[in-house]
Image (cartoon, grey):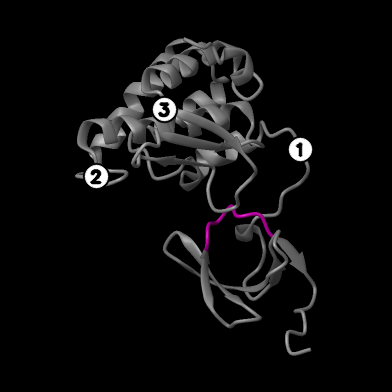
Amino acid sequence: MPDFSKQLSKYIPAAAAPIISQWINDTACRFKVTKSRASKLGDYRSPYKDEPHQITVNHDLNPYSFLITTVHEFAHLKTWQQHKNKVKPHGSEWKQNFKSLMDPFLRLNIFPQDICHALLKYMNNPAASSCTDLQLYRVLKNYDKQQTEIITIESISEKAYFSIKSGRVFQKQEKLRKRYKCIELATQRIYLFHPVAEVFPIEQPVDTAS
């Protein structure tokens, strides 16, 4: 069987690489490192016709985020093997698989203490993405390679204008439960933003009529 440990060590802690390599071999999974995607950190696709399981993970995640995302997606793979599409994507079956797959990495003490503490709390009820757990997300962001100051939507004032990486411009509105209601100026459509979504404040709205 091929050993992917060396390649994986470019993206995850070296001690974790042999385990993930073994998972790739055991499941005959197509594992791809992809360009950054704003909408997701990783993705799992079940086998289709002659295509194998496929897992993709964004290339620009720090090693700990990359590993947690990889475990997240392998939990989807394992859940599909056990139940196909008969259970909810992030239901109790997936949660149990995520916890069991994460266990060897916790026993190896791969994660720094602050991540380990936040991760253990998150694992009490793991969600669709580590990004949805604000404490875990914030701790993981501390280990990003680029330690430039990131402005999040929760840190700007209500009615403030901001743009996102794609250049689209929005105005922040009130908070609805866990997310912020925002209006896109060009379309007047309403979008919900995660509190720690990265934004770029602007002093004046862009004249969308011109």
Instruction: Tell me the magenta residue range.
Output: 193-199
Task: Report whether 135 appears left or right of 94.
Answer: right
The reply to whether the magenta stretch includes residue 185 is: no
Secondary structure at badge 2 equals loop
Q: Residue at x 37, y 23 (%)?
A: 27
The residue labelled by disc 2 is 85
The tag on residue 147 is: 1
The tag on residue 78 is: none
Q: What's the residue type where badge 2 is placed?
A: Asn
Query: Local crowd at mark 1 within 10 Å, few (<14), some, or many (≥20)?
Result: few
The picture places residue 56, in percent across and down from the top left corner, at 52, 37
The residue labelled by disc 3 is 120
**Which of the marked residues, 2 or 1, is nearer the chain's N terminus?**
2
> Is 184 drawn above or below residue 113 in the view shown?
below
> Is 175 drawn above or below residue 52 in the view shown?
below
The picture places residue 83, in percent across and down from the top left corner, at 20, 36
Q: How far apart in space, not on screen, are marks 3 and 1 (Cα)?
A: 25 Å
Q: Residue at x 49, y 24 (%)?
A: 116
Task: Report whether 194 appears left or right of 101.
Answer: right
Q: How far apart in space, not on screen, are marks 2 and 1 (Cα)?
A: 40 Å
Q: Nearer the viewer, residue 184 or 204?
A: 184
Q: Nearer the viewer, residue 206 or 147?
A: 206
Residue 112 shows in the view:
yes
Q: How far apart in space, not on screen, are marks 3 and 2 (Cα)?
A: 28 Å
Q: What's the residue type where badge 1 is placed?
A: Gln
**Total marks drawn?**
3
